[in-house]
């Protein structure tokens, strides 16, 4: 701390505070000898205006539910956010700032949700934060429409974000922005750090579109601030943006990357490398900042920033009172909202989940999933989601739960709407054909809190969502993915639509549960897991084709078995020691059962293990795993996906029946048969495995 008022006499508090952000950031980056100084230096002024004049937040309680949300989409500018968090009084010490990017610190290279108080979402992959903010604003609109009552605006906050050139170049942004414009999310306000420089170039080389016109065309409200250091102009623009209730806002703030650095301002060298000791010195001289000591924070500036603590306390106290009045007027609603805020699952939410009884036709697991979803939706008021234009295929529409749309939008052609009302309180989201956007938006919905979001598409297109799925897993967000058409058995659409490596790819993401249920009853059990598993995302892989329904009377162990990730579905006949274990997931479980019958007819004793979720199974004690998959009994794994990954279960040198090439276009049964998913082939392979094992 110091009495430094720099060369500002009388004190220009705004300028002093803005420079405090700049130099705190560049000193930390210089000390770490790693980081991105250009963005904090250029964006410091508008970040300062937003955080000190507009952002409604409570540094003492970063989780206050009605706070404004701030998303730093350009996550590489993390030091800007850490500076703001420290200066405004969050639980982030100056020592943590000094330990920027170091082992064990809570100031990693890119902001991470859950690690640093006040960080709303993990950002770094450009464009994702933009999409997250759209999801956050959707959550706000949804919860406000659902829970607010006249005179009781309990949910009422803005979602702000800092977005950069890189964010706006990425495709995911186009999808999310288009949807946000359509939905008229008036409380979403993004400030665009329009500095014309990226990591390796000026935007003149690659990005010369008229961003303002582009966002106008999306239906956004756009404004330009010509001088990125003009605090009053920035203030006016944010006020205008707030006034516009019908459109999301983009404020193009013309800034200079590395502002103040005599040799590096407006060059890409200022983007991603420390300025260097000498240039830091010259920059300090240039902006009238004392050269020593580093991390110098003028007392007056700190005191000014720290006003946020008192203001935040007051804002929350006022809200607490409002909530008390709301609870008096609407006790049930308030209790319900309190539960949602705590992310509690209402008791008895699963009481209407059907038990599926076997019939001749069987049922596709996507259909069973749709029935389960509809049996739980009325009990889970904030279960919200939809598909990327695939409702009739994914069976994810929640009947009569309303369509999430702007109520003022004229309905000209309502085809595809689910029914039950056209409003922000609708539980059915329509993402359009925007899987990238959907992935990022789902993360925003979950990060906001209060909702249980789901998104659906074909399993093959999970590839389009992979970056967001990975971030959901990293953040531990409760997002549910409903991926249907989960194998080559989808048939006629052919190899472009047939997932082969996707199951393995998803299984390889840490902290993502991947569940591939074998039938309708395993699907019901999978949904139990999906709703109860709050600490991370869950992906369901579901069949297009009908599958025989497993009889719960015959297989009472099924629900608990699915919870364990894998279980013995059928023992060898009369419980005799088995010659082989057939392991299968999803649609191949019924094939394994049929093959077992055939093998038993041939005097070969076979047992069948259903392994719907590797992650849960791997987490079981070794005794359980070895009881399900005794290592001394040879194993044959059957799954319509790549074989890589099966070895931990079956041991080396043992066969799998799998798909290690792309699929083909033909009726599903034929593709499956041709690829070896037939009773004949399974039995033949099983006999072979047993023979080889005897030899070994
Ligand atoms: C999806 C993705 N691709 C590439 C990168 C690597 N990267 C980080 S910052 C950056 C340049 C971004 O430029 P801009 O958004 O203008 O930020 P500024 O230079 O203003 O700091 C790149 C390419 C990334 N973080 N995310």
Image (tube, rainbow, N blue to C red):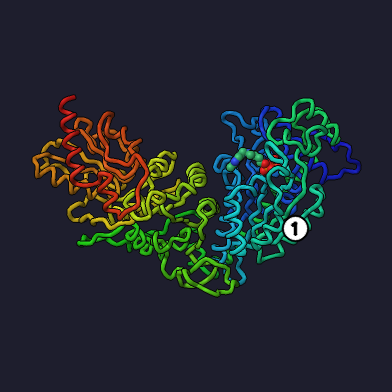
Residue name at image x 70 percent, y 44 percent:
88
Q: Which residue is mark 1?
A: 223
Find ligand 1 in the image and state its quadrant: top right
Residue closer to the observer: 614 or 584: 584
Residue closer to the observer: 373 or 381: 373
Task: State which quadrant residue 551 falls in.
Answer: bottom left
Residue 562, position as x, y percentages in the image = 29, 48
Residue closer to the observer: 347 or 645: 645
Residue 270, position as x, y percentages in the image = 73, 34
Relative placement, left or right, of 618 versus 256 is: left
| Residue 43 visible in the current orientation | no
Q: Which quarter of the rendering shows the C terminus?
A: top left
Q: Is residue 636 above or below residue 71?
A: above
Residue 298, position as x, y percentages in the image = 80, 37
Q: Which quarter of the rendering shows the N terminus?
A: top right
Task: State which quadrant residue 213 falls in.
Answer: bottom right
Relative placement, left or right, of 692 versus 332 is: left
Residue name at image x 79 percent, y 25 percent:
278
Q: Residue furthest front?
A: 665
Q: Residues within 10 Å of mark 1 (few under 14, many from 20)?
A: some
Residue name at image x 74 percent, y 44 percent:
195
Residue 603, position as x, y percentages in the image = 8, 40
Q: Residue furthest right?
A: 9
Relative placement, left or right, of 305 versus 574 is: right
Q: Is residue 354 above or below residue 106?
A: below
Q: Secondary structure at mark 1?
A: strand
């Amino acid at each position: 701390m110091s009495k430094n008022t720099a060369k500002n006499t009388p004190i220009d508090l705004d300028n002093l505070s803005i420079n405090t952000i700049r130099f705190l950031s560049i000193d930390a980056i210089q000390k770490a000898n790693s980081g991105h100084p250009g963005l904090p230096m250029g964006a410091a002024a508008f970040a300062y205006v937003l955080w000190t004049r507009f952002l409604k937040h409570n540094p003492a309680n970063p989780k206050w539910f009605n706070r404004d949300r701030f998303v730093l989409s350009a996550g590489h500018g993390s030091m800007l956010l850490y500076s703001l968090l420290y200066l405004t009084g969050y639980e982030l010490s100056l020592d943590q700032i000094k330990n920027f990017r170091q082992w064990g610190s809570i100031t990693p290279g890119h902001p991470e949700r859950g690690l640093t108080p006040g960080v709303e979402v993990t950002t770094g992959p450009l464009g994702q934060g933009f999409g997250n903010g759209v999801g956050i604003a959707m959550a706000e609109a949804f919860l406000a429409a659902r829970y607010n009552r006249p005179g009781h605006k309990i949910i009422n906050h803005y979602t702000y974000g800092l977005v950069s050139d890189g964010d706006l170049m990425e495709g995911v942004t186009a999808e999310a922005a288009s949807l946000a414009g359509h939905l008229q999310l008036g409380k979403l306000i993004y400030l665009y750090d329009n500095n014309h420089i990226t990591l390796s170039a000026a935007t003149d080389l690659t990005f010369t579109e008229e961003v303002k016109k582009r966002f106008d065309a999306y239906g956004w409200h756009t404004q330009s601030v010509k001088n990125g250091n003009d605090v009053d102009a920035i203030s006016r623009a944010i006020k205008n943006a707030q006034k516009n209730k019908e459109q999301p806002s983009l404020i193009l703030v013309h800034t200079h990357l590395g502002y103040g650095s005599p040799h590096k301002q407006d060059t890409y060298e200022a983007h991603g490398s420390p300025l260097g000791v000498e240039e830091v010195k010259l920059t300090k001289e240039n902006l009238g900042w004392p050269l020593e000591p580093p991390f110098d924070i003028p007392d007056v500036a700190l005191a000014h920033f720290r006003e946020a603590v008192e203001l935040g306390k007051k804002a929350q106290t006022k809200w607490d009172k409002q909530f008390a009045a709301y609870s008096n007027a609407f006790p049930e609603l308030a209790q319900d909202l309190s539960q949602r805020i705590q992310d509690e699952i209402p008791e008895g939410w699963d009481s209407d989940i059907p038990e599926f009884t076997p019939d001749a036709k069987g049922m596709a697991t996507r259909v069973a999933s749709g029935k389960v979803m509809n049996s739980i939706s009325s009990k889970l008021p904030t279960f919200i989601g939809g598909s990327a234009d695939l409702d009739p295929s994914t069976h994810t529409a929640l009947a009569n739960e309303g369509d999430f749309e702007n109520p003022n939008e004229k309905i000209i052609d309502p085809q595809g709407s689910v029914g039950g009302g056209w409003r922000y309180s609708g539980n059915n989201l329509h993402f359009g054909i925007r899987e990238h956007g959907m992935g990022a938006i789902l993360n925003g919905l979950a990060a906001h809190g209060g909702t249980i979001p789901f998104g659906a598409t074909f399993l093959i297109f999970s590839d389009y969502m992979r970056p967001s799925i990975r971030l959901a897993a990293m953040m531990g967000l409760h997002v549910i993915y409903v991926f249907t058409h989960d194998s080559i058995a989808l048939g006629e659409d052919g190899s472009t639509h047939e997932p082969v490596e996707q199951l393995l790819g998803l299984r390889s993401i840490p902290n993502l549960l991947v569940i591939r249920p074998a039938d309708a009853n395993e699907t019901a059990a999978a949904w139990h897991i999906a709703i109860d598993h709050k600490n991370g995302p869950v992906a369901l892989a579901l069949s297009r084709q009908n599958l025989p329904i497993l009889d719960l009377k015959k297989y009472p162990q099924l629900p608990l078995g699915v919870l364990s990730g894998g279980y013995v579905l059928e023992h060898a006949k009369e419980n005799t020691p088995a010659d082989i274990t057939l392991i299968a997931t999803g649609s191949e479980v019924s094939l394994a059962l049929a093959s077992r019958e055939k093998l038993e007819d041939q005097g070969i004793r076979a047992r069948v293990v259903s392994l719907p979720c590797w992650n849960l199974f791997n987490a079981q004690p070794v005794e359980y795993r070895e009881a399900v998959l005794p290592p001394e009994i040879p194993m044959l794994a059957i799954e319509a996906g790549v074989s890589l990954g099966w070895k931990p279960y079956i041991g080396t040198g043992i066969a799998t029946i799998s798909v290690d090439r792309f699929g083909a276009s033909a009726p599903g049964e034929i593709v499956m048969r041709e690829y070896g998913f037939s009773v004949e082939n399974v039995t033949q392979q099983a006999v072979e495995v047993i023979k080889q094992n005897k030899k070994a």
